[in-house]
Amino acid sequence: MAEQVLTKLADKSHWDDVYRRLEVEEMPWFNPELDRDIEKALDNLNIKKGKALDIGTGPGTQAIELAKRGFKV
């Protein structure tokens, strides 16, 4: 199903349909864990705490995971 959704998203007219039909957890880009790119960057740069601003990334899962790591979000 995720592949079908991504194929349809190539045509921007389907975005509204996706958000109407699917629960956020069913969307192909939903990630309940900290994004691997963010995690890798934090680890590589040895960043353990700080401030983070999470703008428009959906249900706030990235903000939650950063807060669990000690960030002020």
Image (tube, rainbow, N blue to C red):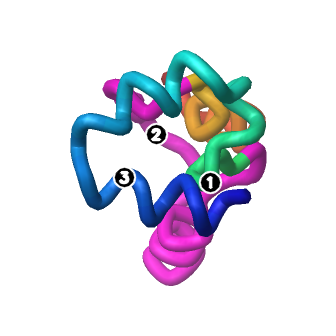
Seen from the viewer's position, the closer of residues 1 and 60 is: 1
Q: In this view, does 53 lie to the left or right of 50?
A: left
Give percent across and percent down for residue 19.
51, 24
Spatial CA span between label 2 and label 1: 29 Å
* Residue where numbered disc 2 is placed: 50
Residue at image point 51% right, 66% down: 42
Q: In the rendering, which numbered label is found on residue 28?
A: 1
Q: Is mark 2 on a helix, strand or loop?
A: loop
Tell which residue pokes out farthest to the top in this image. 20
Q: Earlier in the sequence, mark 3 or mark 2?
A: 3
Q: Which of marks 1 and 3 is nearer the N terminus?
A: 3
Q: Is mark 3 on a helix, strand or loop?
A: helix
Q: What residue type is labelled 3?
A: Leu
* Residue where numbered disc 3 is placed: 9
Seen from the viewer's position, the closer of residues 56 and 9 is: 9
Give percent across and percent down for residue 24.
67, 28
Depth check, mark 3 against mark 2: the one in front is 3
Tell which residue pokes out farthest to the left in this image. 12
Depth check, mark 1 against mark 3: the one in front is 3
* Residue 71 against residue 46 in the figure, above or below: above
Residue 1 shown in magenta: no
Magenta residues? 32-58
